[in-house]
Amino acid sequence: MVKYNHCEKCKKVYNTTPWIGEVHTYNSICPSCMAGEQQENQMQKESAEVHKVNKYDMEQDDRIEDVHESTHSSPIEIEKNLLSRVEQMANDVLSDQGSMDVLIKEIQVGLVDKAKERIEAIFQSFDVNKIDAQKIVNYVEKTFEYISEYKDYMDNVVIKLQANPKMKVKTAIEKVYKEALGNLPKNVAKDVLFNKKTMLNTVYGNSVKLYNTYSDIKDELELTKKMVLHPFNEIQKKLSTLPFYASK
């Protein structure tokens, strides 16, 4: 005799096994329905992410527009206002109220690109102040190259800590690194694999460095939050030293 395993969604038989008597069960999902369900979940997740990005983008536009209308600020004042809000915007990203990509774009367009224009307009060629200012802009753009991956890496660290409250932050950092290293794609071009491994090592190196910087913080969630916010605070600090953004 046979045991018939039916899909609880489509009711079709997807598997049979020898059994005493004839039995029909409806407590599992067939591979086809499972794949469809996963695809549907993925589409809903992507749709929610797009909605979140668009909503955040619109809110940022509204904030900047409000600044224009309420204070009639000059362009330089608007940029300084944006610079002062960098940490809060980064906090919004941490609390899933904003998008990392949108934040980077806003800083790039609203601050870095504007800073480049001001550097060219203010300083003469070979001016030592121009060279120093360009170094600051280059630092910020270099940080942009890894900051999204770094945030994702630290998200995985936090997930491990939440799953195992007894785990130490440093241990979680090491585990995420080893797992990420093992999950690097194998069937890709050598240069692609090299770049991915280099990025992972950069992110891992920064996470270890920042852990050492903040390791005296006993609350692990506060510690990881400080680690994630650090690059944004450095961006804010560096850009604030530019002559045209420095407070008078």
Image (cartoon, rainbow, N blue to C red):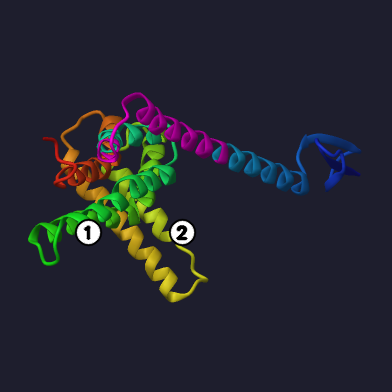
- Height in image: 225 above or below 42? above
Where residue 165 sits, quadrant-wise, is top left
- Height in image: 240 above or below 73? below
Q: Tell me which label, 2 or 1, sits earlier in the chain.
A: 1
Question: Mark 2 sits on what residue?
Answer: 183
Q: Secondary structure at mark 1?
A: helix
In depth, the one of 198 and 111 nearer the eye is 111
Residues under numbered marks 2 and 1 in contact, where contact means CB atoms less than 8 Å apart: no
Q: Is residue 184 shown in magenta? A: no
Quadrant the C terminus occupies: top left
Q: Is residue 78 shown in magenta? A: yes
Distance Cα–Cα, label 2 vs label 1 = 44 Å
Amino acid type at mark 1:
Glu
**Horizontal arrangement in the rendering, residue 185 relative to residue 95 (left or right):** right
Amino acid type at mark 2:
Asn
Q: In the rendered image, is residue 205 in sight?
A: no
Question: Mark 1 sits on what residue?
Answer: 120
